[in-house]
Image (spheres, grey):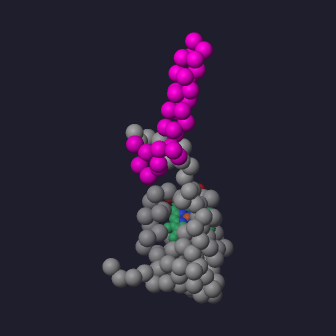
Amino acid sequence: MAEPKRFSRKEITERNTKKDAVFIIDNQVYDVTKFLDDHPGGHEVLLNVVGKDASEDFDDVGHSIDAKEMMKKYRIGELIDEDKVFVKAQKSAWGSSSGSTEATNDSFYTSWKFPVMLGLLLTVLYSYVFG
Ligand code: HEM
């Protein structure tokens, strides 16, 4: 696949009209000029964020998986590395191992297993010494 086209944030700020409606979501660049009238949430909300980083507004709405699938069609590239921001991607160590029996990426010490094992060990030790 071809390399994605790269844009700077400054370049995007100039593309803020109905006829050239572009915004950024999670470091990806979307051209929604043709989507304005088809957006189920209306064209006004989109026009409020053209030329800007709409990541937060997009997230706040809690868009469906379908919407996220639909976005791919309007992606025209991504930001240059210098202009990218990484805000989320931080899951707590407690949450990340839930639902699986193995702590996939977590080391033993950052997963829930460590405090649980420590607790058990101390309980056994306590009853042994004072029991
Ligand atoms: C390419 C980007 C986008 C796509 C493909 C998209 C798609 C959709 C779709 C399919 C829905 C219907 C509900 C759902 O399936 O979640 C929706 C609703 C909505 N969207 Fe977007 N959207 C995009 C960007 C945005 C942005 C940037 C904003 C805010 C600035 C926004 C605000 C809304 C609002 C307010 C609703 C209505 C929610 C409701 O009625 O409960 N959307 N969008």
Figure quadrant of the N terminus: bottom left
Magenta residues span: 102-131
Q: Position of residue 27 (x, y in %)?
A: 54, 73
Vertical comparison of 5 with 104: above or below: below
Q: Observer-nearest residue: 54 or 16? A: 54
Q: Position of residue 59 (x, y in %)?
A: 59, 60
Q: Observer-nearest residue: 106 or 23? A: 106
Residue closest to the far right: 48
**Ligand 1 location (quadrant):** bottom right
Q: Position of residue 121 (x, y in %)?
A: 52, 27
Vertical comparison of 115 with 30: above or below: above
Residue closest to the far front: 129
Main secondary structure type of the part rendered in magenta: helix
Is residue 54 toward the left or the right of residue 2 in the image?
right
Residue depicted at x 58% and y 20% = 126
Vertical comparison of 7 with 61: above or below: below
